[in-house]
Image (cartoon, rainbow, N blue to C red):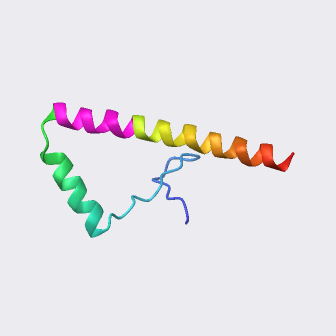
Amino acid sequence: MEPENDGKEGEYQPKPRVLDDKEETLLSLFNQLPEAEKLRVILHTKSVLQEMDLLKNDVFDLINDLKK
């Protein structure tokens, strides 16, 4: 993927990502939510991602312990 440049030297401008139909639908539904619900979804997603990261670290530690 080639970086785009809008004429300013040294500034990287990534190409916008094209959403597929499923992502477009989810974004449309998300945008229809009230602001409080949007924040709730964002916070919930953030906590799930943090839990997944902790699990990933635990699995990584288990694998390393087995290698010893």
Write the residue at 69% across / 45% down: 60
Q: Magenta stretch: give its range.
A: 36-46
Tell me the quarter of the picture where residue 46 sits. Answer: top left
Q: Position of residue 61 (x, y in %)?
A: 71, 41
Write the residue at 49% across / 59% down: 4
Q: Residue 31 or 1: which is nearer the viewer?
A: 31
Q: Residue 51 or 11: which is nearer the viewer?
A: 51
Which residue of the protein is positioned furthest toward the bottom in this rendering?
A: 21
Q: Residue 32 or 1: which is nearer the viewer?
A: 32
Q: Position of residue 49 (x, y in %)?
A: 45, 41
Quadrant for the N terminus in the image: bottom right
Write the residue at 24% across / 56% down: 26
Q: Position of residue 50 (x, y in %)?
A: 48, 36
Reply above or below: 50 against 30: above
Which residue of the protein is positioned furthest toward the front in this rendering?
A: 66
Tell whether 40 sits left or right of 52: left
Write the residue at 14% across / 42% down: 33
Q: Position of residue 20 (x, y in %)?
A: 31, 68
Tell whether 49 sits left or right of 65: left
